[in-house]
């Protein structure tokens, strides 16, 4: 798919996903200094190299200010995919936590964006209040919606809209059962060219469930990218990702 190739051609890393971040001693020392100055995330973001004409300052500033379980590259990729969607198309993000992956799809894009979370995980981090502050800061009420509910209820209700999901990103629980089940349910709304982003692809259960799903529907999906990272929470692709498309 042209847009995915274009995005990946545009990005590179100072420290690539194959590098063991624990052995990047200079990176770690400098990061410590930035942390003391309260600018650790600004330093980590510098690991992603983007051509100047493809840099979106508003997006970068938004993402710098939202706590995330994702890297800048993840947010950047989501944003570029959404920028490529038409104004009547939709990005659905299940699992928003404090809003990083959702707002990545909202800044300087024209598509509809739906976020879903029941705030059942990481309760100790009080995500709801922070999420709502972040979401309200960037939302365009006619395009951007948030549904506080279990994703299965959301997808059940989606049926009545009679539209496909054009870009789907599930980032809820990542056990095999959840990973497979969400794809099976969302599958009802995939149409030709729907892009599916898988996060935490380093995880065995995530990889297995995704591959089992794709194998179950021969010739229906094309794998576009697969990235694993040497360590967890890597400054390139965090915990790995994968992108596939309905053909
Ligand atoms: C890893 S976090 C999401 C991180 C987020 N994508 C980001 O960019 O920072 C997973 C989120 O999925 C939500 N979640 C888990 N199970 C869910 C379910 N059944 N329905 C809706 N949301 C769920 C959790 O409440 C949690 O906020």
Image (spheres, rainbow, N blue to C red):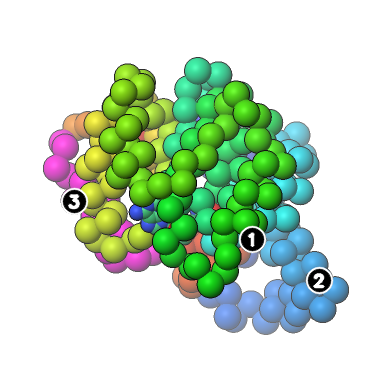
Alpha carbons under labels 2 and 1: distance apart: 14 Å
Q: Which residue is mark 3?
A: 212
Seen at 28% across and 35% down, the residue is 156
Q: Is label 3 in a helix, a strand or a loop?
A: helix
For label 1, the SS is loop
> Magenta residues, as a range?
198-218
On the image, the x and y values in percent for residue 242 come to 40, 49
Q: Is mark 1 within 8 Å of ligand 1?
A: yes
Q: Nearer the viewer, residue 207 or 5?
A: 207
Tell me if 210 is positioned left or right of 139 in this view: left
Task: Please name the residue shown 40% across and 47% down the image.
Answer: 149
Q: Quadrant of residue 10?
A: top right
Residue 18 appears left or right of 107: left
Above or below, comparing residue 115 to residue 131 in the picture: above
Mark 2 vs ligand 1: CB under 8 Å? no
Disc ID at residue 145: none
At a point 75% along the width and 69% down the height, the residue shown is 40
Mark before the other along the chain sequence, 2 or 1: 2
Residue at image mark 1 = 67
Q: Quadrant of ligand 1?
A: bottom left
Q: Nearer the viewer, mark 2 or mark 3?
A: 2
Q: Earlier in the sequence, mark 3 or mark 1?
A: 1
Q: Is residue 76 visible?
A: no
**Residue tagged by mark 2?**
38
Residue 56 horizontal/vertical position (percent): 73, 39
Could you say which is closer to the camera, residue 73 or residue 175?
Answer: 175
Tell me the crowding category of disc 2: few under 14, some 14 to 19, or many 20 or more residues within 10 angstroms, Cα based: few
Quadrant of the rendering where the C terminus is positioned = top left
Q: Residue drawn at (64%, 56%), measured in percent from left and top?
A: 130
């Amino acid at each position: 798919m042209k847009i995915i190739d274009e995005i990946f051609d545009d990005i590179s890393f100072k420290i690539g996903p194959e590098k063991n971040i624990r052995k990047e001693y200079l990176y770690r020392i400098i990061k410590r200094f930035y942390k003391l100055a309260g600018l650790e995330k600004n330093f980590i973001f510098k690991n992603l190299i983007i051509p100047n004409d493809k840099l979106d300052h508003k997006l970068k500033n938004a993402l710098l200010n939202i706590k995330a379980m994702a890297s800048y590259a993840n947010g950047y990729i989501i944003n570029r995919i959404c920028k490529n969607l038409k104004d009547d198309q939709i990005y659905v993000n299940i699992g928003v936590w404090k809003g990083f992956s959702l707002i990545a799809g909202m800044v300087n894009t024209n598509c509809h964006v739906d976020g879903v979370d029941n705030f059942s995980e990481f309760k100790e981090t009080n995500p709801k209040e922070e999420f709502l502050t972040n979401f309200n800061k960037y939302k365009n009420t006619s395009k951007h919606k948030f549904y506080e509910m279990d994703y299965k209820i959301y997808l059940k209700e989606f049926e009545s809209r009679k539209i496909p999901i054009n870009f789907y990103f599930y980032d809820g629980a990542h056990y095999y059962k959840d990973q497979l089940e969400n794809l099976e349910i969302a599958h009802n709304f995939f149409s030709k060219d729907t892009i599916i982003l898988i996060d935490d692809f380093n995880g065995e259960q995530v990889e297995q469930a995704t591959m089992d799903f794709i194998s179950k529907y021969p010739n229906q999906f094309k794998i576009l990218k697969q990235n694993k990272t040497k360590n967890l929470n890597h400054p390139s692709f965090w915990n790995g990702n994968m992108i596939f498309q309905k053909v």
